[in-house]
Image (cartoon, helix red, strand yellow):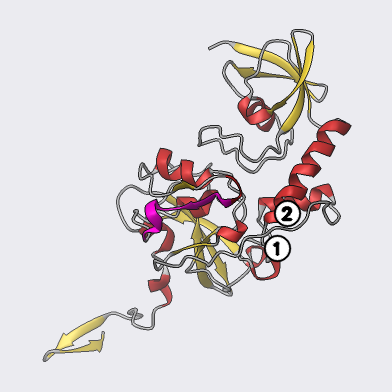
Amino acid sequence: MNIINLVINDKPISAPEGTNVFQAALDNNIYIPGLCYHPKLSQFGGCRLCYVEVTERKRTSHRFACAHPVSEGMIVKVDTPRVIRYRKSVMEYLLAHHELSCPTCDKSGECGLQNITYEMNLAPGRFRTVRMHQPVIRDNPVLELNRNRCILCGRCVSACKEIEGNSAIDFQNRGFKTVIGTAFDRPLECSFCGGCVAVCPTGAWQDRTLGFRGRPWEFASTPTICPYCSVGCTVVVNTKTDDVRRIVSNDRLGINEGNLCVKGRFGHEFIHSPERLKTPLIRKNGELYPA
């Protein structure tokens, strides 16, 4: 494999041939904002936030880092005045269409859109607010879709298709009417792995088992092994006051690389069930007694 040498923000780095600029920067601890890129998924280039200045073959142009491959001698600048102005304009547009329900959103505190808004110190935007008023879809016990929070980054669509192999969801309609949904708006028919929740950067997809049971910064996180089957997937248990509130995953831990099944991600409510046995029982004359 050929190694490409380039410079990002005056820092000489190297990356394997075929790597995109975003991943090369990520591997070398250089921050480029982005909401649609995910290392496990194909490049989509939908959020337009990874806009950078690129000089290669003595020509300077502006590209999207997640969709542009590195080349020998390339010079990349990620924070020029023009680049920053462009990103702020994109963020203003996203916020003009986004449901600003941060006080009650379970994603608050780990929301990519919220974090970038804070980093950019954005004032009220210039664009007229045109927000959707779509009903929240709760057609199953574990997943919830709030289209009013969706920024159409495409992560959930790619995760469902490329990782789980289901293609249960996709883009619907065109233009301002574009939404994420199922074919003909039928109830969701998938394996309910929760991959859409794991990759969603804004809280459009939510874990219904969590709802108002704690904020991300209140949780203690404990990596462990899922007990359900012999695969041995790594899960991260989030607890609050010694109660298990949710199960999440970490892409950098375990053989499963952050992928879980419905039992591993959502099958934890039995832990605090009042019907769970707390002491060994012995049967006498057809009745169970504490041993």
Horizontal side of 139 relative to 21 (left or right) equals left
Front one among 48 and 18: 48
Farthest residue, direction top: 57
The quarter in which the C terminus is drawn is bottom left
**Residue sitting at x 68%, y 37%:** 48
- Write down the quadrant of residue 191 in the picture: bottom left
Horizontal side of 173 relative to 69 (left or right) equals left
Residue position for label 2 = 95
Is residue 27 at all visible to an observer of this figure? no
- Write down the quadrant of residue 214 in the picture: bottom right
What percent of the width, then of the height, locates residue 221? Answer: 57, 59
Residue 249 marker: none
**Residue sitting at x 65%, y 41%:** 47
Tell me which segment is drawn in magenta. 177-186
**Residue sitting at x 38%, y 51%:** 183
- Give the SS element for disc 2: helix
Residue 100 marker: 1
Inspect the image, locate mark 2, and give the three-letter code of the amino acid beneath it: Leu
Is residue 175 at all visible to an observer of this figure? yes
- Give the SS element for disc 1: loop
Indicate whether residue 40 is drawn in magenta.
no
Question: Are the residues tagged 1 and 2 within 8 Å (C-beta)?
Answer: yes
How many residues crowd around disc 1 within 10 Å: few (fewer than 14), some, or many (20 or more)?
some
Horizontal side of 16 relative to 88 (left or right) equals left
